[in-house]
Image (cartoon, coloured by chain):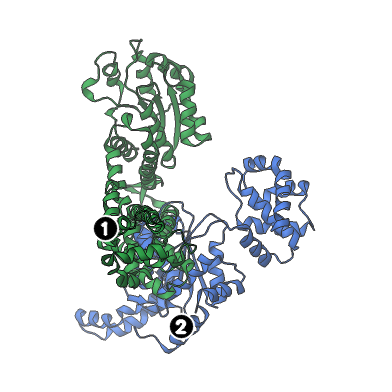
Chain colours: A blue, B green
Amino acid sequence: MSKPQGAARLGATMNDLLHSIPATEDGLESAGYIPSRSIATAVYLAHHLQKPILVEGPAGVGKTELAKAISAWLSLPLIRMQCYEGLDESKALYEWKYGKQLLYTQILKDKMGAKLGEESTLEAAVEKLHGVGDLFFSDHFLEPRPLLRALREPGGAVLLVDEVDKADQEFEAFLLEILSDYQVSIPEIGTVKAVVPPFVLLTSNSMRDLGDALKRRCLHLHIGLPDAKLEGRIVASRVPGVAEGLRRQLVHFVQGLRGLDLKKLPSVSETLDWARVLVLLHARELEPDMVRDTLNVLLKFESDIEAAAPRVVELIQAARRDAGFG
Amino acid sequence: MDGPLIEFFRAARSAGLRVSPAESIDAVRAVQVVGWEDRCALHDTLALVMAKTVEEKRQFDECFDLFFRRQGFRGEAPTPGEDGDAPDAGSPAAGEAEGAGGAGSELGRMLLEGDQAGLAAAMEAAAQEAGIRNIAVFTQVNLFARRILERMGLNALDREIRALAGTPQGDRLARAREMLREQARDLVQQNLLLFAKGETERWRERMLAESRLTSIDRRDHERMRILVRAMARRLAVQYGRNRKRDRRGQLDIRRTLRRNMAWDAIPFLTIWKQEVIDKPKLVVLCDVSGSVAALAQFLLMFLYALKEALSGLRAFAFAGELIEVSEILERQPIEKAITEIMTKVGFGSSNYGNSLADFSNGFLSILDRQSTVIILGDGRGNRTDPRVPILQDIANRSKGVIWLNPEPRTLWGTGDSDMLRYAPHCRVTAVCATLAQLERIITDLLKDAR
């Protein structure tokens, strides 16, 4: 494993940035992502053990944001691959530029003819062709897709494999080689090994259970809904315009809302949206009418809104009380 | 250094986590990076490497707390659990304290002085010697507690107490001995929980899957529910997605052209037309009269846990008459729903003819040729009119009727059983008395749905 000079230097700076768990926490914060301790631990370990992180959790708790924050903090390019049913090698790894190959053969036809014309026998011509045969299956005609791009990025990269549970089971198996050895095999060229192992994050919404083989190769991070304190810090960092009193109230209100029996609990992204809405409305405090009118920002099902609307006043009172103490 | 970790892996496996050798290697490497000092960081680290689902995270938390609390030693002295935080602190100290048991008075001295650290270390060492890690069943608790105390020098202590009988020091020692007994028992209990739980649990689960559902004890119901859910979950994952099958020989021209664009649409790669394998659509009729009620509960639980692998599910319950219970089952957790259903129709004597007529009058229109009807019952209508033609009508309108009967085949048709009269109209009749049988039947159903 002899890394080129540049990669070694880069590794050193990354080690500096990620020298301890608190440093990781601060670093992510500087990129605008307020992590919980276990998130910081996961990022720290992922770097030091060179393992991918599999992030699970409900929608909107910041799984994708985490990847963006890491890439911003470490100033590495973010390469994102969105998974879906039917995703295959040619879309995830590489494809040949067929058009270009055809075009080149057309253009080079005459040259070939001239060259091969010199040969007297068929065998000799074939022999000559062998010399240029690999030309059309070389780097020039290779169209790298996200996975290959991430491996070939000279300075390392953050590779985000988003919603891996949406892809087929076969694709999961295909990911294994990349995740454990940071290399892929391309039949026509050979094995491509990562210049610098990319920082890999996989996210999953638990649409289906992922295979054990995949899980075994990853650190498994579960991000749940944050507590009031953490959520308050997240809102403060993401929506700086919101006054402190209002911020506390709205965070406690959302926390209270999560205690109700709802189909889809509001997650952090909804809290942030709501905070932005309240700032736009120039709100100073939570008012029942205003909350009722903007409830559709927090709750995405008609039945949830109907269930929550009658309890708004009660929840606001509780939120005001908690905010006063907190 | 890695000794405690390896023991922790054993404990974790026993708690139901699947820790493969690869994961244990990762865990050791991770701990080398993070270090032992910070208990919180240690917890987060091991959780990241070892627990891979939400359920496993919960099990992991329990196991972690139990394991790393183990070295703590509480006594009547005012310094409780002071030494509990350093997981590997116990082992070197234990070596020194090993000779303490033989001296006899050494144990007495430690008890009188309230030397918590010394006692903890001595007990830990004695427990190791007694082979506590091999404890397998709860009946061994007293035996192991006894062995530990003997190795710590209980006999000498007994003699000492007899010699000092009557003096205040003797009384104090006697009290301390009782404390010690209790603590030894606690230690053994804890080890039982840590190292033996998995083994007994697995054994029980195997037994439960094979035993008759109607005769399962009420206190095992909770465990059964977990088991049923796990089974259903496994099937749901396997069959929950839309499955497709190639119809070889029928070219999908549109997709083939698109795939071969790059070659001037010369079809190098062919793509066949596919047919979607339908998820089964089920209508379930459950007899909830006394004789079959327990079984009905598990069948409904199974099917509702499986919902994502089914395209539709309507449930009906009957005893003397029939009502639809889909809504009750969807509205609340299964345990409560079952109770509500039971109070509504359950525990009467069953009347199959009447119930079938109810279904045919009210709900016959929900059947189409994609729906499979599952009837669960023993077919014993208490000598009422079985009204077989109605079942025939149901069978004709649907894809087929599957009759699950908890009784063994030899009893079918005996006494008031109308099973043999219903059987000709059923696509499948099966004996379904244990969870293992139930799983097999449902798997077949999912597999050949088309």
Decide which of B106, A189 is in the foreground and name it.
B106
**Rendering quarter of residue A62:** bottom right
Is residue B383 rendered to the left or right of residue B367? left
For disc 2, the neighbor class at 10 Å (few under 14, some 14 to 19, many from 20) is some
Work out whether A313 lies above or below B50: above
Q: Residue at x 29, y 32 (%)?
A: B212
Is residue A145 visible from the viewing direction of this image? no
CB under 8 Å between callouts 2 and 1? Answer: no
Eye-nearest disc, 2 or 1: 1
What SS does tag 1 mark?
helix
Q: CA distance from mark 2 to mark 1?
A: 63 Å
Q: Residue furthest front?
A: B166
What label sits on residue B155 in the rendered view?
Answer: 1
Q: Name the residue type under label 2.
A: Gly
The dot on residue A11 is 2
Where residue B405 sits, quadrant-wise, is top left
Q: Residue at the spot x=61%, y=51% of the render?
A: A266
* Dot 1 amino acid type: Asn
Q: Position of residue B198 (x, y in %)?
A: 32, 51
Horizontal relation, residue A196 to residue B153: left or right: right
